[in-house]
Image (cartoon, rainbow, N blue to C red):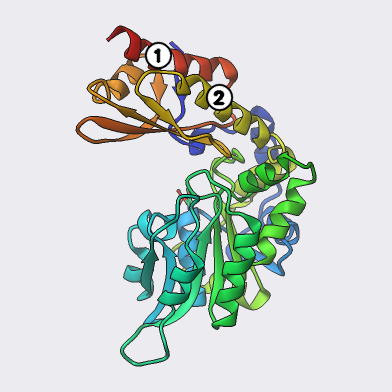
Amino acid sequence: MKTVDLRSDTVTQPTPAMRATMLEAPLGDDVFADDPTVNALQSRIAELLGKEAALFVPTGTQSNLVAIMSHCGRGDEYLVGQMAHTYRWEGGGAAVLGSVQPQPLEHQSDGTLAIADIEAAIKPDDSHFARSRLLTLENTIGGKVLPLAYVADATALARRRGLATHLDGARLFNAAVAGVAALGGDPRAKAREIATHFDSVSVCFSKGLGAPVGSALVGSKEFIRAAHRWRKMLGGGMRQSGVLAAAALHALDHHIDRLADDHALARRLAEGLAGLPGMTVEAPQTNIVFADLHGPLAAGLMAHLSSRGVLATGSFYVQSSRLRFVTHLDVDAAGVDRAVAAVREHLMTA
Ligand SMILES: *Cc1c(COP(=O)(O)O)cnc(C)c1O
């Protein structure tokens, strides 16, 4: 039985063409800054996102941590969403390793942080308070695309109040591809347009772009110089990392536009699930589908799915469960249909 792995877009295997470019990549020692493939990737992603410089890092978590530590010092704080990766899913790294206090804010239903909440959370310059130094946003957030007008307003407010801005754009290219879907246009230009509003941006190559490892942090030369020092301190100085950068370059060449396929599969999955009894499905904007199941069948659903070779992630409550399905490079329409069939089988025959 072939497994359909919808747990995350991180599970993709490098394609044969990607493996071939990794094997052929010219390599150096990136700690001596002479790995030509890493240098090529850093120039490429900086230019693509309209920033002066970039840093290749092993993970998105390290990228965000390095960014927060480069923008903020001890006793500073960053404003961040309650459900943001940079707050909830990074082990408290900014506080533990950076002595930077998070100021988490509730999200609105579209994933944004209300402008009024951001404004109210910025502390006056008073020794009782941590110094508000940074606003971090995430795009996509829970698979939702932040409206560009919102991004402009939120970052303008931050700038007006003297805060730096960081975007966790782990799935920035999903946002960009979704952003041009209706009217057409180049997703690369859209990604740059989104990035323009921020001082720094982190992007993952290991999610929908399909590379095995790696993220990039982009920003000004001065910012990246600071980030480079923190990366070294955090153990992120890698050596012949061009072998990984080659995969990321290949992904930038070949895997941006095809994210539209993942988005179409997510819609196919959502439509398939939406008609099933007890299921509530949010229409996906990108490659992530959330489906809520209410009633007594919720408890056994995940076990049933895995018995049918369908993998997803989920949270469970007494009489309900929330499932998350993520489409990616290694999923096709047949796989999506098998996932829907497995859910249907559980709901109709139990
Ligand atoms: C995956 C992800 C990251 C980074 O994850 P790593 O596993 O550390 O590479 C950061 N932010 C968001 C929104 C993510 O989805």
Q: Is residue 20 above or below residue 275?
A: below
In the figure, is residue 335 to the left or right of 292? right
> SS of the residue at dot 2?
loop
Amino acid at pointer 1: Arg
Task: Tell me the quadrant of the picture where the N terminus can be found.
Answer: top left
- Which residue is tagged 2? 331
Q: Residue at x 69, y 34 (%)?
A: 258
Residue at (56, 71) in percent of width and height: 165
Quadrant of the rendered image containing residue 265 = top right
Q: Position of residue 252 (x, y in %)?
A: 70, 45
* Residue 344's disc number: 1
Give residue 214's position: percent from left, percent from top: 55, 50
Residue found farthest to the left: 318
- Picture quarter containing residue 261? top right
* Mark 1–mark 2 distance (CA, rounded to whole Å): 19 Å
All told, the count of numbered labels is 2
Q: Which residue shows up at 27% across the image and 31% down it?
A: 320
On screen, residue 328 versus residue 43, left or right, reads left
Of the 4 image quadrants, the one containing the C terminus is top left
